[in-house]
Amino acid sequence: MKRSVTVVGAGPAGLTLANLIQQSGIDCVVLERASRTHVETRPRAGVLEHRSVTMLESLGLADRLLMEADRHGTCEFRVSGKAFQVSYSDLYGGREHYVYPQQEVVKDLIGGFLDTGGDIRFSVSDVELRDLTSSSPSVAFTSEDGTRETVSSDFVAGCDGFHGVSRPSIPEGVLTEFTHQHGIEWLTILAEAPPSTKATIYALHDDGFAGHMLRSPTISRFYLQVPVGTKAEDWSDEQVWEALHKRFTLHDSSWALTEGKIIEKRVLDMRSHVVEPMSYGRLYLLGDAAHIITPVGAKGMNLAMNDAATFGRALIDFYATGSETGLKTYSEDCLRRVWRAQEFSQWMVNMIHTDVSSPFFGRLAQARLEHLAESPAYRATFAENYVGP
């Protein structure tokens, strides 16, 4: 099999890239280890920045998103029983967040790609990347029916996530890895409960952080900061709701938390990871294969789609003019945005979490929140970074 580009991974990065280059006449194949049903139904982050939405619009794949997504331009912070809101859309040119689950984005991208003749191989296994420094790298894989196949191409896009095969295919010593364990864990909760708020809530409490994230008119996502080493089964549903009520409490307010059936509980270890460079030979890393960011600030999917747009433009330029400029600067161009997002996410992590071992850092977090509540300049900077430049 011969294609111009082999895309390993059918997540937001790989599928955005595949649609972008296919619509520009560049043939490709997408290899995905999971089934189509799995990638179209697994619940993931659901916040899109305006840049991502604009790109999907340019591909003709945003109709359902624009019709169904909730738009949000305000978030709320709670500390010591008091609340304040930041209308970040008003502070940054009317730009908003679009709340639209990642699995729905994936579904739209798969549909658009297949409708225009795209080739996706689901449920593949034993994927091997070969000859990455040659002019014709190849990817071997076992198809769903057990047949061993090989596809040769000009370029390989590694979009298969942190645990995929793409990054480990790069020889040891080539990449510089930057990793940070935040020493913070969240219990993430998905509940069949209508949102209790019209704005995302970040609550700082002596017991730890609590978050209320918007997902749909009937589903809500909650986060609870828990001690490191906690297991999901350590928390009963009753304990979850009790903790959420306590941490979201407001003085002198009639606000109430709406409960519902909890359909998912898991523990998330807060970590950050970046590799430099994001390429090796004819292999280019995109999304989680190159960088992991905390959920704070909702940057992960948007960074992945930005990688796809950057690499896609470089490929289009290469095949149209022969220029390798975009390919050579791909890593630098992406990393500039990645590190800016990492810095903002780290700043927010420090602002909304309680460190029971260090009252000093707890006071710093309160000082940051007070500054955000009182300073127009501070809020403007927050808005620019939060909703995306």
Image (cartoon, rainbow, N blue to C red):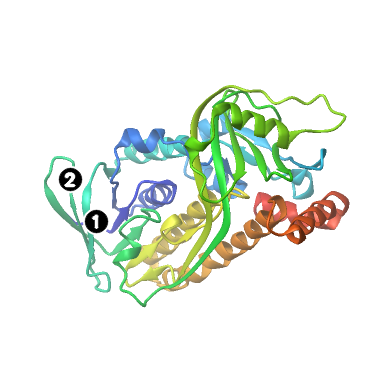
Other residues around mark 1 within 10 Å, as few (<14) / some (14–19) / many (≥20): some
Q: Nearer the viewer, residue 347 or 309?
A: 347
Q: Which residue is mark 2?
A: 143
Give the structural element (helix, strand or loop) at label 2: loop
Q: Position of residue 10 (x, y in %)?
A: 36, 46
Residue sitting at 74 percent across and 46 percent down?
Answer: 206
Q: Is residue 58 above or below residue 153?
A: above
Q: Residue 253, position in %: x, y?
A: 84, 28
Q: Secondary structure at mark 1?
A: loop
| Quadrant of the snapshot with the C terminus | bottom right
Q: Does residue 279 appear left or right of residue 299 in this picture?
A: left
Residue shown at the point (22%, 49%) measured from the top left: 125
Where's the N terminus, which quadrant? bottom left
Q: Residue 19 in the image: x percent, y percent?
A: 39, 47
Judging depth in this view, the residue of 247 and 377 nearest the camera is: 247
- Tag of residue 173: none
Frontmost of labels 2 and 1 is 2
Name the residue at the left extreme: 147
Q: In this orientation, which residue lies closer to the viewer: 58 or 16? A: 16
Pick whichever of labels 2 and 1 is earlier in the sequence.
1
**What is the spatial separation of the Cα atoms under label 2 and label 1, in whole angstroms?**
17 Å
- Which residue is labeled 1 in the image? 3
The quadrant holding residue 244 is: top right
| Amino acid bearing label 2 | Ser
From this view, report whether residue 271 is shown above or below residue 336.
above
The answer to whether 242 appears left or right of 290 in the picture is right
- Res 24 visible: yes
Q: Which residue is at 86% across, 53% downward?
A: 376
Quick one: 129 or 56, which is closer to the camera? 129
Relative placement, left or right, of 378 versus 46 is right
- Whether residue 199 can be seen here: no
